[in-house]
Amino acid sequence: MIKKFSVRNFRNVSVDDLTFNQINILIGPNNSGKTNFIKALSFFANMIIGGKENSYDSSFLSEVDRNGWIKLLNKDSSASPEVSFKWNIELNGEVCDYQFDFHTGQQIEQFFITKEELSVSEKNPKQVRPFNYFKCHTEKKGSCIFSTAYKKGQNNKRVEIPVSNQDTVLFQFKDTLFEKPEIDPNKIIRKQFNPKFEELLKYFKGFSSYSSAQFNLNSIRQPVETKIKGIVLNKDGSNFVNVFNHHKSKDLYFKVKFEESLKQLMPHISTTDISIEFEKLVFRMGYNQNQFDLSDVSDGTIKALLLTLLLTLPEESYSLMALDEPEMNMHPAWQKIIGKWILTHQTKRQYFISTHSPDFLDAFTDGFKAGRVGIFVFGDKVNQGIRKLSYEEIKDELGDWQLGDLYRTNDPVIGGWPTW
């Protein structure tokens, strides 16, 4: 779980130590930074998941390319050509700070990592500073300082290893440094870092963000090849049928849980299943004694199916899920039900959800009052354009109302619908 996040100079987003909850709702007008914030939060995860693409033998340069090179730098950051990220993350009970900074410019050669560091976030009373696992490029460009201590009370001799500043050390350590026994002949560093690197990589690989506007509804409606991967949902939703079929095959109760949730949205649904037609998979559902496939139903129904699937997938499928405007094409009654699913879902999964819908926002009122839900207002000039609301701050305005009520009336403390 991400406890805090800092970012500087990424597009129109700059925040310091913004604290999060398990469920985090992002509200504000268009172009206020909600989508860019999710991109910033997911930058390193997308880099890890995307790997080395776009003809670059570097996951870092590939992710920079996907973000538009110089376009990812804040237009107002004339004083500094550097972008900085810091995630405060809980990994197996230990809270760590992971920092990733890089230089930008007008040429590819000017994009390089200036700092990559992993430390325990707090020091114990006997330490001068928090324990540092590694720090790269800070003392010398192209070098990384590793700690050799991996047991309590052990002497901590630091080892300097040459690394590239055009890709993350996590990939280099795993793919390259392990292949050079002369670097670590006693395997001290490998004993210390391989488990921690695996934890960090697994955590970031569990990030996924979905935008309702990016779902390819025409592709989703088509029968699909049986060999298409189907463990997690693609960003465009095109492998929906494969994902459903994969988890239905692995877990006898997956289909039951999926249908139980779906019936809360559409009570007349009797069953869902997969059939094979012309050697392709087709998703079917029984509704009012009739059979329908995805080519027969509305855009809103398909998006409801996608969200139901995402929220039914096993906890280990995602460590963090970001949903951008999930309410698009959704009936207000469905929005409230889906919001309640997220609120009552007992899972370690962390959510970041941007919305313009007061009906969807209503569902999170009780969670906000109980401290389980964080509400973040974008477009505010306080705290670099992002303000986290506290219940005490708006208790009087909220009263017995729902959060969406304040949004509908454009209450100054929360913003909302424009008043033309």
Image (spheres, grey):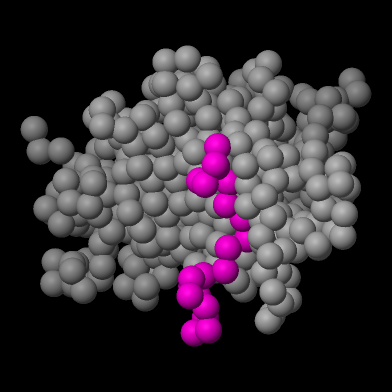
Q: Nearer the viewer, residue 114 or 182?
A: 182
Residue 46 makes an appearance in the image: no
- Residue 388: quarter of image: bottom left
**Residue farthest to the left?**
420
Magenta span main SS: loop
Q: Where does residue 3 sit, x and y in percent of width and height?
A: 46, 63
Q: Where does residue 258 sit, x and y in percent of width and height?
A: 69, 54
Assign the C terminus to one quadrant of the image. Answer: top left
Asked whether, in this view, residue 56 is left or right of residue 334, the answer is right
**Residue farthest to the right?**
279
Q: Nearer the viewer, residue 101 or 222?
A: 101
Residue 18 makes an appearance in the image: yes
Q: Nearer the viewer, residue 15 or 166?
A: 166
Q: Residue at x 26, y 28 (%)?
A: 78
- Residue 238: quarter of image: top right
Q: Nearer the viewer, residue 83 or 384?
A: 83
Q: Residue at x 37, y 73 (%)?
A: 371
Q: Where does residue 125 sit, x and y in percent of width and height?
A: 49, 84
Assign the N terminus to one quadrant of the image. Answer: bottom right
Q: Where does residue 154 sit, x and y in percent of width and height?
A: 71, 77
Q: Residue at x 80, y 39 (%)?
A: 175
- Residue 185: quarter of image: bottom right
Asked whether, in this view, residue 324 is left or right of residue 348, the answer is left
Position of residue 146 relative to residue 173, above or below, is below
Asked whether, in this view, residue 253 is left or right of residue 50, the answer is right
Position of residue 303 relative to residue 269, above or below, is above
Q: Residue at x 57, y 69 (%)?
A: 131
Residue 132 falls within the magenta-colored stretch: yes
Magenta segment range?
A: 122-141
The number of numbered badges drawn on the structure is 0
Residue 405 falls within the magenta-colored stretch: no
